[in-house]
Amino acid sequence: MCRWICLMTALVLLLAGASAAFGEGVTLRTVSSFAGADAAAEAYVDILKAYEAETGNTVLDTSAVSDEAWKTGVLQDFAAGSEPDILFFFAAGADSAPILSRVVPVGEINAAYPGLDLPENDALRESDGKVYAVPVRSFWEGLFVNADVFEECGVELPTDWDSFCACIRTFREKGVVPIAVSLSDIPHYLAEFALLSCASPEELQARPRTLEQVPGSWYEAMALIRELAETGAFEDNAFATDESSSTALFRDKKAAMQIDGSWLASSLPKESMQSTLVLPVPKHNGNGMAENCVGGVSMGFYLTRRAWRSDRRDAAVLLMGMLTREDSLRRLGYSGLNGKLIVSAEEMLAGRGLIGPLQDAMNRDAREVWLLECIPAVAAGRMTPEECWQRVMSLCPFGE
């Protein structure tokens, strides 16, 4: 708090003599994925409002739920030179590579504003050795289950692949959707689930440059998705529904399971906390559950060069500091969540290594083809696993 007071005082003095002083009002543009059902969306808006009240400046925010369309829109804005002043976006992967020349390294910001002392997290270090984003929260992915639905249907929680498949058959017979998923817009977590179920940690971290180098387990994972579709694991309209609708099925207890990430936990109503569990992924071949989980640190706040080189610079730095100070990070992170769900998540992660999503290592074109074209086609039986990886690898997903 003392650091924040000192920073605020210093920047007020700086701005008092600048042409873009507090009294004259500065307008900043921000973009983030704190929107929709994300429990931190309200906190994010509150922080922006507090900044406006303290400074007299105006913040124009155009945040939206993170999906491929949102990612593409952000990158298109950068390409067109209309990027915001502050951005919450993906880091240390294929998504961030196109914007690095248009955002300011954290070290450069700290050098110009030593009182700010923004953290440089090694997990977000880019290929050039610099850190450009300040992370808010880590993430993990797992198998979410409505434990009360399991109990009502007399179904035991899955402990291996056989019991997982038995769950699917029983729920289908009882008229309950086994797994809520949208194959039309967000099949991402299903794809990572299938890979984690089939591949070893070394294979999950492979970055093949040719089709011949693609691990056999990656083909097995695509075949697994088709197998699940054939057994009725997904809702009947999974190929046409959207993520918000499929998530509503899970939230409303009309679906027993959902494969998703920690952001889903933050959006669940409090009354569901005691009846929602998260489990690791069952192994397709072998006993028990996978020894690893998909997760890591993937997103953070950026300050853009557009703001850095303008008369909005001090105002933007002040907002960056406000968004990333300790109390803000607590509000935007998951520390406010509690109950059985989070205990379950901690148990799931205990002793398991975190492996970053394969999609994050792919270039955008290959990732979109894999997730939005190949996965639905494979699930529907219109494309074989071999054709899937031929299509993806033709786009050099991991470089030449």
Image (tube, rainbow, N blue to C red):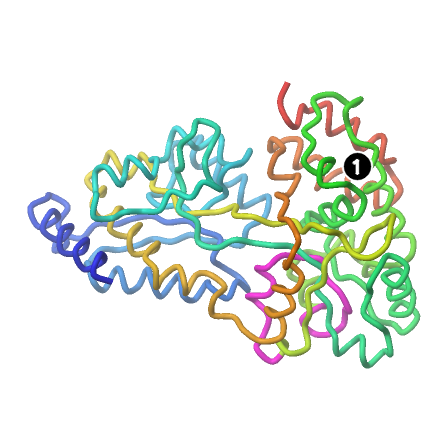
Which residue occupies 40% across, 37% down? 131
The amino acid type of the residue labelled 1 equals: Trp
Q: Is residue 367 above or below residue 393?
A: below
Residue 255 lies in the magenta-colored region: yes
Q: Toward the viewer: 367 or 291? A: 291
Give neighbour class at mark 1: few <14, some 14-19, many 20+ (Cα, 10 Å).
many
Q: Is 219 displayed left or right of 275 in the figure?
A: right
Give the magenta-colored segment's residue range.
Answer: 250-271
Left or right relative to 318: residue 272: right
Q: Quadrant of the N terminus?
A: bottom left
Q: Secondary structure at mark 1?
A: helix
Residue placed farthest to the front in the image? 351
The reply, left or right, for residue 337 in relation to residue 133 is right
Q: Position of residue 388 (x, y in %)?
A: 80, 33
Which quadrant is home to the C terminus? top right
Name the residue that disc number 1 marks. 218
Q: Nearer the viewer, residue 96 or 124?
A: 124
* Residue 263 in the image, given as x and y percentages of width and height: 57, 59
Rendered position, 259 above or below 355: below
